[in-house]
Image (cartoon, rainbow, N blue to C red):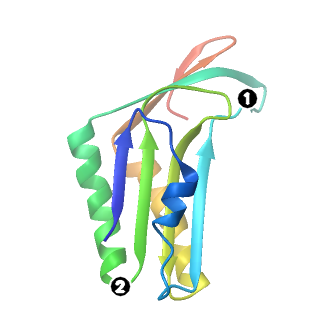
């Protein structure tokens, strides 16, 4: 059964990875997004994430359920609130029978999450405050 969490609590990468392990899966792929200092010439001080949580949770369920129906396991966690440099912002993990499926679905999940799930990023940089990418 998929595990989905949107919270202000720090992301415990190891415990989320443990949720993916099972004898039936031969491939586990994870993606962990962290707060980076530099984006090109822009220096980040910190990021604040907010969400319309009920809708975001429903959207995550819509992403995870079809993949699990194909026999894989999905784990997604996204952090809200203020995050400092190097803090984990998002964890996406997929366990599947084979690595190709796990890679494909993990990439699909993170790309679709960033595009479709109502989680917003307010980035405070050394020169300005920016919303989004």
Residue at (56% x, 88% y) in the render: 98
Instruction: Give percent across and percent down for residue 89.
Output: 53, 40
Secondary element type, mark 2: loop
Residue at (41% x, 80% y) in the render: 72
Q: Nearer the viewer, residue 70 or 1?
A: 1
Q: Give the total number of marks visible in the rendering.
A: 2
Residue 109 in sight = yes
| Disc assigned to residue 68 | none
Answer few, some or many: residues within 10 Å of disc 1's Cα (few below 14, many 20 plus, some between 14 and 19).
some
Q: Is residue 94 above or below residue 16?
A: below
Q: Quarter of the image for the C terminus: give it.
A: top right
Residue with the most extreme right position = 41
- From the image, tell me which residue sits under label 1: 37
Q: Is residue 3 above or below residue 119?
A: below
Mark earlier in primary sequence (1, 2): 1
Residue 105 in sight = no
* In contact (CB < 8 Å): disc 1 and disc 2: no
Q: Nearer the viewer, residue 110 or 116?
A: 110
| Disc assigned to residue 70 | 2
Answer few, some or many: residues within 10 Å of disc 2's Cα (few below 14, many 20 plus, some between 14 and 19).
few
Q: Is residue 66 above or below residue 36?
A: below
């Amino acid at each position: 059964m998929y595990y989905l969490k949107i919270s202000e609590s720090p992301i415990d990468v190891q415990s989320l990875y443990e949720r993916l392990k099972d004898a039936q899966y031969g491939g586990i792929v994870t993606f962990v997004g962290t707060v980076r200092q530099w984006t090109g010439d822009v220096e980040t001080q910190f990021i604040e994430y907010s969400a319309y949580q009920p809708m975001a949770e429903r959207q995550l369920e819509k992403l995870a359920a079809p993949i699990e129906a194909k026999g894989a396991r999905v784990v997604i966690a996204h952090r809200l609130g203020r995050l400092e440099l190097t803090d984990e912002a998002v964890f996406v993990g997929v366990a599947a029978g084979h690595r190709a499926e796990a890679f494909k679905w993990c990439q699909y999940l993170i790309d679709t999450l960033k595009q479709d799930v109502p989680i917003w990023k307010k980035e405070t940089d050394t020169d300005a405050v920016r919303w989004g990418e």
